[in-house]
């Protein structure tokens, strides 16, 4: 079964597509070995079907997702409305480019990277593990 976003002709479908394109932070929730959800904010780029994220090589999320690749991506909803939650699977994606060679990622985050880390190379040396999230379901309101 192929995953499809909600119909863009609907109000919800329009919001989901816009938020996946424009939002800066998504909350990635993995499950640890004791079964406890472990949410954490992370930057991402959406290509229309999947999300590309980058992780630190020493992040515990990598251990958890290798054991249980079922995760959720939650788009921030500070005031309790415009909720969007995607569930699916995540895996390391070594064929994706490193951050300094990813023009889409740099277009979205380049200014933030320069301000906080100096260069894309420096940032990419820290967040060096590309991850690919493939959704299977979306819900929200």
Image: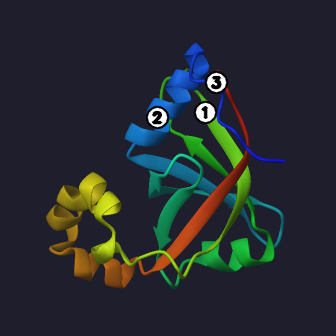
Q: Quadrant of residue 13?
A: top right
Residue at 51 percent across and 24 percent down: it is: 15
Residue 80 in view: no
Q: Nearer the viewer, mark 3 or mark 1?
A: 3
Residue at mark 2: 19
Q: Residue 56 versus residue 102: which sits nearer the camera? A: 102
Residue 84: mark: 1
Badge 2 vs badge 1, beta-carbon distance below 8 Å: yes
Q: Secondary structure at mark 2?
A: helix
Q: How far apart are labels 3 and 1 at the CA level?
A: 14 Å
In the image, residue 5 above or below residue 2: above
Q: Position of residue 34 (x, y in %)?
A: 83, 69
In the rendered image, which quarter is residue 107 located in? bottom left
Where does the image place residue 120, in percent across and percent down from the top left?
23, 74
Asked whether the residues under the numbered discs 2 and 3 touch, taking CB atoms below 8 Å apart as contact, a structural biologist would say no
**Residue 106 position by quadrant:** bottom left
Q: Secondary structure at mark 3?
A: loop
For label 3, the residue is: 7
Cα separation, mark 2 vs mark 1, equals: 9 Å
Under circle 1, the secondary element is strand
């Amino acid at each position: 079964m192929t995953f499809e976003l909600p119909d863009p002709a609907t109000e919800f479908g329009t919001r989901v597509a816009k938020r996946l394109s424009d939002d800066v932070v998504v909350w990635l929730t993995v499950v640890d070995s004791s079964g406890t959800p472990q949410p954490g904010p992370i930057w991402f780029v959406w290509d229309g079907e999947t999300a590309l994220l980058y992780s630190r090589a020493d992040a515990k999320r990598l251990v958890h997702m290798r054991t249980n690749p079922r995760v959720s991506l939650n788009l921030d909803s500070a005031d309790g409305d415009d909720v969007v939650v995607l569930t699916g699977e995540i895996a390391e994606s070594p064929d994706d480019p490193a951050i300094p060679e990813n023009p889409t990622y740099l277009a979205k985050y380049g200014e933030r990277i320069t301000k906080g880390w100096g260069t894309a190379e420096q940032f990419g040396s820290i967040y060096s593990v590309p991850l690919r999230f493939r959704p299977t379901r979306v819900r929200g309101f």
